Image: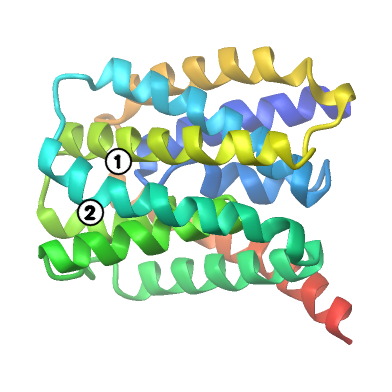
Amino acid sequence: MVELLFFVLAFIAEIIGTTAGFGSSTIFLPLALFFVNFKTALILVAFFHISGNIGRITFFRHGFNKRLIFIFGVPSVILTVFGALLVNHTPQDILKLILGIFLLIFSIASIVKPDFKFKSSDKNAVIGGGLSGFLAGLIGTGGALRGAFLTAFNLKKEVYIATAAFIALAVDITRIPIYFGSGFLESQFYFYLPLLFVIAIAGSFTGKKIVDRIPQSSFRKFVLYIIAIISLKFIYDGILFLI
């Protein structure tokens, strides 16, 4: 029953991530932590995320911004390596605290200033790529920050989704081998991987079907409130560890 709930939440997270525009890992990682430890959640969500991004690239394949993929994606991949290597040297409760603070800041900032954008410049693309890649490697989710920088370039919805998915795919391909090499995935979770692959593709397909049928601003705000509430739990756990 617990495993079934885990997979149902994964499917919902992929639909939400596709339609809300800031990635399934931002939704699914906090939820996964209610079922497994941080390192296991990192690799399961990373694999799930890579599967979902393959789906998004397939379903939105007619819109890529190749220049952004290069200037944003290269620093993102490089800094992902550093973030992923730091996981083994940082207590899990500290990582939860970092994740909680990041999600809380992101959700509040997005609610208060939903139209906030960084300046669309090559410099910001490099900075945004590097920071989002580092966070993706360290705490498993950099999509929110990646989205904040990419929206500055006023891409069409389809181009934004495809470009962000391609960059995220490159990040996932980089960090997953590091997680595997560090022994994050125990053998009892191996059978989760093919199921998560199917669920991610199905969730991406479902998200594509409804992305233009819902009021984007209202839906996104609702999701942000949920993320803020969940983030408080991880901040609380991290503070208890420090005390």
At horizontal 13% and vertical 36% (from top left) the residue drawn is: 66
Which colour style is shown?
rainbow
Query: On the rendered structure, is 73 left or right of 47?
Result: left
Mark 2, residue position = 150
Q: Residues within 10 Å of mark 1 (few under 14, many from 20)?
A: many
N-term mark: 2 or 1:
2
**Which x, y percent locates residue 68?**
16, 46
Mark 1, residue position = 164
Task: Specify whether residue 226 is in view.
Answer: no
**Which x, y percent locates residue 102?**
54, 69
Quadrant in the picture for residue 243: bottom right
Query: On the rendered structure, is 188 left or right of 168?
Result: right
Q: Residues within 10 Å of mark 2 (few under 14, many from 20)?
A: many
Quadrant in the picture for residue 190: top right
Q: Nearer the viewer, residue 131 or 120?
A: 131
**Which x, y percent locates residue 9?**
66, 33
Q: Secondary structure at mark 2?
A: helix
Kind of residue sitting beneath label 2: Leu
Q: Give me the C-alpha separation between circle 2 and circle 1.
A: 8 Å
Task: Check whether the beta carbons of the residues at disc 2 and disc 1 lie within 8 A of each other.
Answer: yes
